[in-house]
Image (spheres, rainbow, N blue to C red):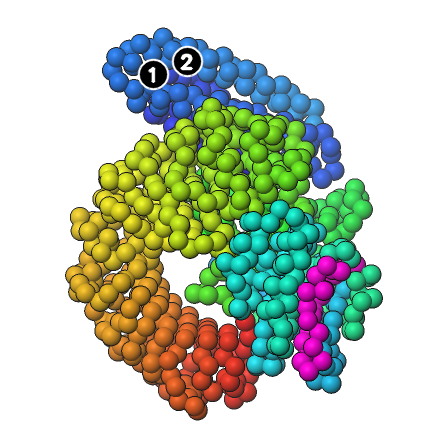
Amino acid sequence: MAAEAAISSTVELLGDQLIHKVKFLRGVRGQVQLLKEELKRMQSFLKDANKKQAEDESVRSWISEIRDVAHDAEDTIEMFLVNVEHARNRGLLKRCISFAKRMRHLDRIGGEIESIRARLAAVDESRERCGIRSLEEAADSTQFSLRQKDEYLVGVDEDVRKLLRESVLDEEKRGLSVVVIDGAGGIGKSTLAREIYKHRDVGDGRFECRGWVVVSSGCTREETMKRLILELPGSDKQKLREVVETAEDEAYIQRKLREMLHQQLRGKNYLIVLDDVWEKEHWEYLKTAFPNEKDKTSRLLVTTRNKLIAKHSEYEHEMKGLDPEKSWELLLNKANIGSSNGKCPEELETIGREIVGKCCGLPLAISVAGGLLVETQTKSGWERVLNQINSYLARAERGVSTILELSYQNLSPQLKSCFLFLAFFKEYYSIPVKRLVDIWIAQGLIRHEGNRTTDEIARGCLNELINRSMVQIDQDFIHDGRVENCRLHDLLSALCLRKAEEEIGLEIIKGDDGFSLAKSSYKHRHRVVHGRVNHETSSLDQNKHLRSLFLLNAGVNDNICVNTPSLYWKSFQLLKMLDLDGFRLQSLPDCFRSLIGLKYLRIHRQSYSSSSHVLKLPSWLDRLKKLEVLIVENDTVVFPNVALKMERLRQFHARGVEGRAMSIENWENIETLKLIRLKDWMECSSSLTANCHLRELHMLMEGDHELSRAKALLEKMTNLVELRLEFHVSLSQMEKIIPCLDSLTTLEVSGWMLECPDASVFPRNLSRLTLSNLNDDPMQELGKLPKLRYLVLSNSKENYVDWRMKVLHDGFPCLEALSLQRMDDLRGIDIEEGGMPRLKRLQIHDCPHLETRNLPKHIIVSAA
């Protein structure tokens, strides 16, 4: 973690676990207490050091030294706790025999703590030479806010209209037309492309097929083509799997992928966005996959910084920086100044305009600079930001990168750590927020505060990073009112990776060629391996300091788990996270039982793999006593014939569950349970008490028998907030299963339903609702729900040729966003005056005949 977070983590470990819980510390207890106090004292100096590091290399070195000491202290303490726990779990005779060993452990930790304290004393001496003072400020108590606003756009409206008129929607341009948007990094190319892609005139049915793929500099040709094939309708996942996993010749794979994409698009009007194409060679490979049929009107929209690529287009749009007034408008919005009257206090304007001038008209730089100003509305605060920018610019060559660096340095310790762990994902990767939140929690970055759950606190951290323009929302429509996917701009991704290597010891390994990108000056603590690896290569050496291991394979080499000697895994006793992506395991390898510190285990089979696989869980799984998150994606889990006692498990997720049902009463802290069958749920939940922690449940229902009993069991779950019911058969009476719970705010029902139930059936505090396959117009009943804010409807079975939804004058008093998906026969939405008064956004996906021109102008209509 960043230095502040590293020390905080070690101090908490010393206070909560070592001093109070380990009873036989004996003579070293005093040394442990002194170490804790000395580390806490250093925290006050870090505040001053962070402010001075921009101008002074020696201060930056001092911060690095204290971070290394904190990490080594944490390693020492955690390894001691592992040894203590191991001794405690042994039988009486062995515990007596191991008494001498425990004494050696005590002597060893005493010596190591003395060594760490001596290093701290040396660090303290160098602090005095650097002139770093103690700033006795109150501890950071920032309450992370809700996301303040959606992406604010300045200066692109005219560009959108021009591109639509002259290229994208020009019917006279037949065949395939290539449109290139080029310009510097951070100038807004992707933002402009996204506004075109989601524009209502683009999504009104004139393009039968649309897709978006980020190419980026770190993306291989195969990855780009696979992701685009999977995103488009009509993809043959089985064929894709066969091509990728069976062919040895890379040239053959690339040729077959081009043929598959060409076949998907042939005979259609299509719009494809290739975002952030860097290399001319990459572009030359990709463009041959797109059919050019003269009787069609298809468009290829490319964003790039490479002017050579623009030469191959029918239409080029070169992005320019914002003019001073547009730049000023954007800064005020991002700084949350003058939101009501559009004016800035006079005492701030001179300073703010000087800050804008440093950003050279680049929207990304302006947005991030505005994020620096959000926390202060005073002249002194704005002057401090300006002085910091000037200091950073004095020692840097590029203005935008300098401002990004400064924005990172101004984050709180917790937000710094959260930002750094975004480096685990590739720069072009769309990051699932739920997965990101689980990683943050497993790494100990998020802790309980009052009545808020760790998930709520983590989403607050993400919202704060979004407010500061450090993280981008990766989709226009926010399902359920929450961000589902996010991403980093490539300039911020480069900053994130560099800082993660320096500050948390992240090591990135390219498995295909076996080299590491990491330049860390101390032991690696987090490792991400991309591609195929062999356990015999030096890139996967044993590392007792490792906390995270992400093996992101190509989907064909599982031997690293199955055949790697158990001695290799025994070295990872401090490992907290293990993420296996692209593996085809049939069971958990026995060597994993050595991972006694594991808190997070994710196993993911590629989505285009065969769907008939199962993963057998071993009876020794509850040996992993610290395990909090167990996610098995795209596999069905088979439980052993024993009741697993998973006391710390918070989240369990699988595609399905088979075998003996788990005894959930042995899962004392379970909060999220996904994809469990109804009959298993009824068997394993009968002994749950009303005050259990379960907040999110996703249940599979294979019939409508025993629904009343299931509803009674659900109504015992008084803390349940989210419920998803998935039916494999037609459900005629939804009211038999939906529980009446005041706590329930999110409900999703997917399957075949005959009609929408009365509004009285739904929980009274429901704010998010998803329904599919209804046979009638549900709007009049759903409009009676008093607190509904987000509504998703899909796959209507209505067969009337001129079907139109009708919203009554008093319908949907609180609805803010509506998503309509895959409704072939829907022609329009008629809203009576007074209906949907708060509706801000309508998202349309695959509703080819839906006309929206009659809707109120304040509603943002976007086509997904």
Q: Which residue is drawn at 74% across and 81% down?
A: 173
Question: What residue sits right under mark 2 in the picture?
Answer: 106
Q: How far apart are marks 2 and 1 (CA)?
A: 9 Å
Res. 85 image quadrant: top left
Q: In this view, does 34 lie above or below 807?
A: above
Q: Do the residues labelled 2 and 1 touch (CB within 8 Å)?
A: yes
Residue 672 percent across, percent down from the top left: 34, 51
Residue at the bottom extreme of this rendering:
802
Identified by mark 1, the residue type is Phe
Q: Which of 357 and 543 is in front in this view?
A: 543
Which residue is found at the position 44% from the left and 84% from the top? 825
* Label number found at residue 24: 1
Magenta residues? 283-306
Relative to the observer, which residue lies in front, 89 or 516?
Answer: 516
Which residue is painted at 73% across and 32% down in the image?
Answer: 57
Quarter of the figure with residue 831:
bottom left
**Circle 1 — which element?**
loop
Horizontal and vertical percent for residue 38? 52, 24
Q: In which quarter of the image is the C terminus?
A: bottom right
Q: Is residue 145 left or right of residue 344?
A: left
152 or 694: nearer the eye?
Answer: 694
Label 1, residues with CA under 10 Å away: few <14, some 14-19, many ≥20 = few
Q: Does the magenta stretch include residue 420?
A: no
**Residue 230: x %, y % from top left:** 55, 61
